[in-house]
Image: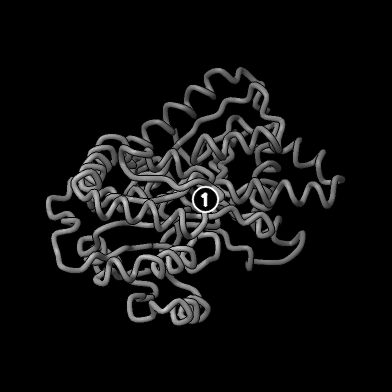
Amino acid sequence: MRYLLVTRDFPPKPGGMSAYYGGLASHLPKDGIAVLSFGMEQGGGVGRYRILYERIKEVHRQYPFDVVLCGNFSVLSYPIFVFHKLFGIPYFLFFHGNDVLMLRRRLKLNPAKRPLVYFVFGRAAGVVTNSHFTLKLVEEVLPLRSKPALVLHPAVPDEFLGLEDTAEPFSKGTTTLLTVARLAWRKGIHMVIRALGLLARDFPNLRYEVVGGGDGGGLRDLARRTGVEGKVVLRGFVDRRELTEVYRSSDMFVMPSLYDRDGCEVEGFGIAFLEAGAFALPVLGSRTGGIPEAVLDGRTGMLVPSNFSEEDLAEVLRWMMTHREESVEMGRRGYERVNSDFTYARRAAQLISFTEGCLRGCRGSCS
C-alpha cells in the first residue's frame, strides 16, 4: 500500500508535530510513502484549496498512492475530500489536541460551517489521534460514533534509542532542572521560575535551563523579580547535537504545562517527556491534557494537579530532590518504557495495520 502524507508540519520545521510526522514517514517502507508539505502561506482564501488540490493530483500522476494521510484537519482536509470524491482514494484524519480545541471554537462562532465539517469528517476512512485525551476531545466535537480510531502516541527518534551514555542525575555538585519547549505561557516555565524562588534558599546549587525558541524577555524579568536571575538560563533554540548534551548534563526534566483556554492550547501528549526518558531523566509534569499518558505518575515521574500553584510545584520538586534514589529509579523506568514502547518502527507498523484493517472493512462505505 502506498501512502501520501499531506501536512503543514514536517522536518526541518521545528516542533512536536513535525517530529511526529517525520518519525512516521521515515519508518514506513521507502517506496510506500510520499510527503506533501503545504504551508498556509501558499495562496490565500479559496485559492489555496485549488493549489493544494492540483498539487495532490500532480503527486498522484507521478506516484499513484492508495491512501491519503491528512496531517492537519480543516484547511488541508477539504481539497483531500474533493480528491477522494473524484478519484476514490480514501483518507485518514490526524488530530493532536490544539487543532480540536480551535475547531470547537470556530464551530461555536460560525455554526453554519458545521454541516460541511461533519460531512468531510464523516467520509474519512478512520481517525488517528496522538493520545486518548485527544480522542476524547474529538468525540466531544465531531460525530465519531463507530468510526475506526487509533491512538498513535508519539515516539522518540532512533538516535535517542538504546543510549548507553545517559544522564547521571544528582551525581554533580549542581542540580540542573531542564525544560525543552517553546517559550509559551502554557508550557509552565514561569511557574518553574516562581517555584525556584521558593527553593533557592534551601538548594543554593539549583539552576534551571530552558531550551526553545521564543521571546524570553518576560521570563528574564520574572527571574529578576523573583531573585533567581543568576540561576535561570534561556538557551534559545539549539541543534540536535547540543540538545543531546543538554539532556545528558541535566538532573531532572520539568514541564508543568497549563491549559490555555483563551488560546485554545493544551498539551496533547508531550513528546519532550519521552526524549527526557530516553536519557533516564526523572520527569515532572502536570495532570493536563495527554501528559498522564506520557508520564506514569509515581513510576516514570511525578505529576502536579492541573490547577497547581507554585507552592505545589515547589513541594514536588523538593520531594524529588531529597528522595534522589526514588527519582533516579523513576528515570530508569522511563528509559525502559521509552525503549520498549515508544519507537517509530513500532508506530509505523501500528499505522499500517490500522489503515489496512480499516480499508478491508470499508466495503464501499468509505466513498
> Is residue 4 visible to the viewer in this orientation of the structure?
no
Quarter of the figure with residue 52 = bottom right
Note whether 338 is above or below 358 in the view shown. below
- Mark 1 is on which residue type? Glu
| Residue at far right of view | 112
**Image label count:** 1
Note whether 365 is above or below 258 in the view shown. above
Locate residue 35, reporting x and y percent: 47, 51
Locate residue 49, reporting x and y percent: 70, 55
Query: Which sits in the foreground, 224 or 9?
Result: 224
Q: How is the image coloured?
A: one colour
Query: Which sits in the foreground, 337 or 21?
Result: 337
Locate residue 111, reporting x and y percent: 85, 45
Query: Which sits in the foreground, 292 or 64?
Result: 292
> Is residue 40 visible to the viewer in this orientation of the structure?
yes
Would residue 229 be found to the left or right of residue 320 on screen? right
Tag 1, which secondary structure?
loop
Q: Residues within 10 Å of mark 1 (few under 14, many from 20)?
A: many
Q: Quadrant of the N terminus?
A: top left
Would residue 188 be found to the left or right of residue 340 on screen? right
Note whether 98 is above or below 133 in the view shown. below
For mark 1, what is the residue?
Answer: 267
Note whether 269 is above or below 350 in the view shown. below
Which residue does the image show at 49% across and 38% down from the upper left?
131
Which residue does the image show at 27% across and 67% down from the upper left?
203
Query: Which sits in the foreground, 174 or 69?
Result: 174
Q: Quadrant of the C terminus?
A: top right
Which residue does the image show at 47% across and 40% down from the upper left?
3
Locate residue 113, reporting x and y percent: 82, 46
Quarter of the figure with residue 237 = bottom left
Which residue does the image show at 59% across and 39% down from the upper left?
93
